[in-house]
Image (cartoon, rainbow, N blue to C red):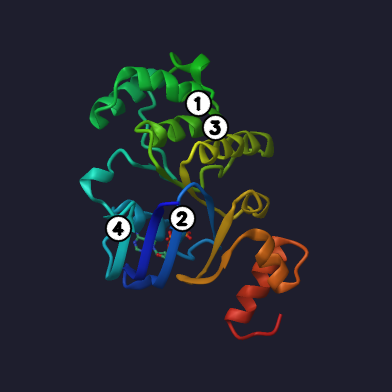
């Protein structure tokens, strides 16, 4: 399996504060990797460094064998941000056709990506008339437009009810089966359980890494939430 992402000794300082404090991490291809950690723990900053839009202070980030942000990664890496950059007064279809032109992707791909995210029926609706769940899928469609081998999704299910969250995770699972590597940040523990591997972040540092089951076994915890709390308190030197 190819190496999708390699991070060495990454340090990022944002606003005078160390947001990522020395992370080493490797991700093999074809996995669903969950990035887990409380608000402010550095998830978005780490994902931005992988996408290549974050100024880094030290270290190296390699995606599919190229430096993060390399022009050749434009189509092989898809990014879904926390705040979707979508035009509200434009139809779903026109939004995506515009993005497709920028990306150098043919209009046929717009139809297939809309099928993929289950928005084919809404394609002529203005984005502002869509529900929250539909809007999330428009953002996802943007990220998947170039048929990326690596998809970076920053809290893609935030604000969605459990039914819609499950529907999105079914799409992620299908993508991973088709060979796409997914990096998904979340702070919802039941979502973390659907990942093949997890990286637990705390105050900009990686405090644990591995398959969910192994993290539970290692800590003797019944739930991932408990495992995370035990790892976090061990990290801060307080007995769990
Ligand atoms: N635009 C910014 N300017 C300055 N500091 C920032 C900015 N965005 C985030 N930070 C800081 O970087 C740290 C990590 O934030 P972030 O990566 O957004 O965490 P998360 O995504 O896990 O909530 C936090 O301490 C936050 O205050
Ligand atoms: Mg964030």
- At numbered mark 2, what does the secondary structure look like: helix, strand or loop? strand
Tell me the residue that label 3 is attached to: 132
Task: Name the N-terminal-most of marks 1 and 4.
Answer: 4
Cα–Cα span, label 1 and label 4: 29 Å
Tell me the residue that label 4 is attached to: 54
Task: Name the N-terminal-most of marks 2 and 1.
Answer: 2
Q: Looking at the image, which residue sits at the far front?
A: 1
Task: Name the N-terminal-most of marks 3 and 1.
Answer: 1
Q: Position of residue 74 (x, y in %)?
A: 27, 41
For disc 1, the neighbor class at 10 Å (few under 14, some 14 to 19, many from 20) is some
Tell me the residue that label 1 is attached to: 116
Q: Which of the 4 quarters of the picture holds residue 132?
A: top right
Left or right: 104 as drawn, with respect to 154: left
Left or right: 33 as drawn, with respect to 23: right
Cα–Cα span, label 2 and label 1: 24 Å
Q: Looking at the image, which residue sits at the far right?
A: 222
Of circles 2 and 3, which is in front?
A: 2
Is there CB contact under 8 Å for labels 2 and 4?
Answer: no
Of circles 2 and 4, which is in front?
A: 2
Relative vertical location of residue 40 with respect to residue 172 in this rendering, above or below: below
Q: Position of residue 117 (x, y in %)?
A: 51, 27
Is there CB contact under 8 Å for labels 2 and 3?
Answer: no
């Amino acid at each position: 399996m190819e190496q999708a992402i390699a991070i060495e000794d990454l340090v990022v300082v944002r606003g005078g504060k160390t947001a990522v404090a020395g992370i080493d991490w490797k991700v093999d291809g074809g996995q669903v990797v969950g990035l887990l950690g409380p608000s402010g723990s550095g998830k978005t900053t780490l994902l931005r460094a992988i996408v290549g839009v974050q100024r880094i202070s030290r270290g190296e980030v390699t995606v599919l064998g190229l430096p993060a942000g390399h022009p050749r990664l434009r189509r092989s890496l898809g990014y879904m941000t926390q705040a979707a950059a979508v035009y509200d007064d434009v139809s779903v279809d026109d939004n995506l056709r515009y993005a497709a032109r920028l990306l150098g992707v043919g209009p046929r791909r717009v139809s297939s990506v809309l099928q993929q995210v289950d928005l084919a029926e809404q394609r002529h609706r203005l984005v502002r008339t869509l529900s929250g769940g539909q809007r999330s899928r428009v953002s996802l469609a943007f990220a998947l437009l170039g048929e990326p081998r690596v998809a970076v999704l920053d809290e893609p299910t935030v604000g969605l009810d459990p039914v819609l969250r499950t529907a999105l995770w079914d799409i992620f699972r299908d993508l991973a089966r088709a060979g796409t590597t997914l990096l998904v940040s979340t702070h919802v523990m039941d979502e973390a359980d659907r990942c093949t591997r997890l990286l637990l972040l705390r105050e900009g540092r990686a405090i644990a890494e591995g398959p969910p089951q192994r993290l539970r076994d290692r800590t003797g915890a019944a739930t991932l939430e408990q495992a995370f709390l035990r790892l976090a308190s061990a990290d801060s030197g307080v007995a769990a």
